Amino acid sequence: MDEDFLDAHQRHWDDAERLYAAKRWANADHLYGFSAECGLKALSEKLKENKLERKEFFHIMESKKPSNAWDIFETYRSGHRLGSKFVMPPSNPFTNWDVSQRYANQINFDQALVEPHRAGAETILKFIAIADKEGLLP
């Protein structure tokens, strides 16, 4: 199947919000990370004006790799004429998020841990709205 980062971003956000409302912190947290990642990948492709290469397929936070989706987006954002429309937070709110947390016991997750990830994913949701308004999205 072909990647549809924009659809995946929205789907993960919607599901994360449902899980958040049900206080299912572990799965909500995981999906906020994927929502942000997919949104950043969708935006990166639009700013790059081309598909991402496989070597650019990173998670929102890759502690054991030299880059992550946040850094890749910043690379394309900073070089684009509309880059100033997407004001990045001073630091990546997903520094303590890792894809491997899907194996962690849910007792390790609470609302305080999830909130920064939710806010980070919401920032990307707002970026998607800006990109749509600016005509970057179909």
Image (cartoon, helix red, strand yellow):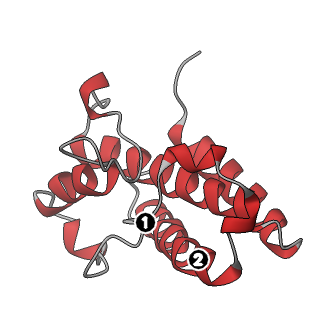
Mark 2 surroundings: few (<14), some (14-19) or many (≥20) residues within 10 A: some
Residue occupying image coordinates x 72% and y 55%: 105
Residue occupying image coordinates x 60% and y 61%: 32
Residue topped by disc 2: 113
Q: Position of residue 26 (x, y in %)?
A: 71, 61
Q: Position of residue 17 (x, y in %)?
A: 76, 67
Residue toward you, 125 or 32: 32
Which quadrant of the view contains residue 96?
bottom left
Which quadrant of the view contains residue 15?
bottom right
Look at the image and tell me in which quarter the N terminus lies: top right
Say which amino acid is labelled 2.
Leu
Q: Position of residue 137 (x, y in %)?
A: 46, 50
Q: Is residue 56 above or below residue 24?
A: above
Residue topped by disc 1: 96
Residue toward you, 27 or 44: 27
User: Quick one: SS at disc 2?
Assistant: helix
Residue 16 shows in the view: no
Q: In the rendered structure, are the residues bearing label 1 and label 2 in contact, judged by CB atoms less than 8 Å apart? A: yes
Q: Is residue 86 above or below residue 132?
A: below
Task: Say whether residue 106 is left or right of residue 90.
Answer: right
